[in-house]
Every structure is written in C-alpha cells, then in structure tokens.
Amino acid sequence: MHVKKGDNIIVLAGKDKGVVGKISRALPKEDMVLVEGVNLKKVHQKSKKGKGKGEIIEKNFPIHVSNVKLHGKT
C-alpha cells in the first residue's frame, strides 16, 4: 500500500471526489482505507436492552486504496 494511517490524502474517484482528508485506519489485507469525513453513510442502530429508541447515526465506510493519493506533506 502506498498510504498509511495518519497520511493526508485526496480522493480521486467516487461521490467524494476531490475531498482532502486524513486516514484514520488502513486495512492492508482488503486494500481499503478509512478516511475521516469521506464515504459517510447513515446506519440504523437498534436500541440498547430493549429500552428507549433506536437512532440513525452517520458512519465512515472504507474506500479502496486505488481511489486515493497522497496530498502534500504530513
């Protein structure tokens, strides 16, 4: 992989094309990276212990490492 955790990157493809972000986690076995603020999706979460309400949270999902490149100095 050409990037690692903590690198500043720019997204080359997809719905977040052109966005600059920082890698929060690298997954080398799957060739994926998690980037802060990129590829956010809304996920429904069930309530805990059957009490209260469930909620909708925004969660980061990984993107393929081929869709990012290093951006400037780290």
Image (cartoon, rainbow, N blue to C red):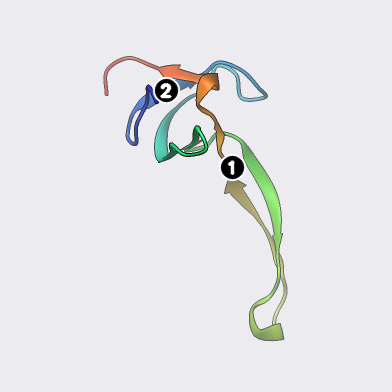
Q: Is residue 4 above or below residue 18?
A: below
* Residues tagged 1 and 2 counted as in contact (Cβ below 8 A): no
Q: Residue at x 68, y 75 (%)?
A: 47
Q: What residue type is labelled 1?
A: Phe
Q: Residue at x 55, y 20 (%)?
A: 67
- Kindly identify which numbered label has been placed on residue 13: none
Q: Crowdedness of circle 1 by 10 Å Cα count: few (<14), some, many (20+)?
A: some
**Residue 6 image offset from top left, x and y in percent:** 32, 34
Q: Is residue 60 above or below residue 22?
A: below
Q: Is residue 71 above or below residue 22?
A: above
Q: Crowdedness of circle 2 by 10 Å Cα count: few (<14), some, many (20+)?
A: many
Quadrant for residue 60, please give it: top right
Q: Mark 1 points at which residue?
A: 61
Residue at the front extreme of this rendering: 29
Q: In which quarter of the image is the N terminus?
A: top left
Q: Mark 2 points at which residue?
A: 9
**Residue 74 image offset from top left, x and y in percent:** 27, 24
> Along the polypeptide, which appears first: circle 1 or circle 2?
2
Which of these two is toward me, 1 or 21?
1
**How far is the residue under mark 1 from the one under mark 2?**
16 Å
The answer to whether residue 49 of the structure is visible from this angle is: yes
Q: In this view, does 3 lie above or below 5?
A: above
Q: What residue type is labelled 2?
A: Ile
Quadrant for residue 27, please give it: top left
Q: What element carries label 1?
A: loop
Which of these two is toward me, 40 or 27?
27
Left or right: 21, with 74 as reference point: right
**Residue 69 image offset from top left, x and y in percent:** 44, 17
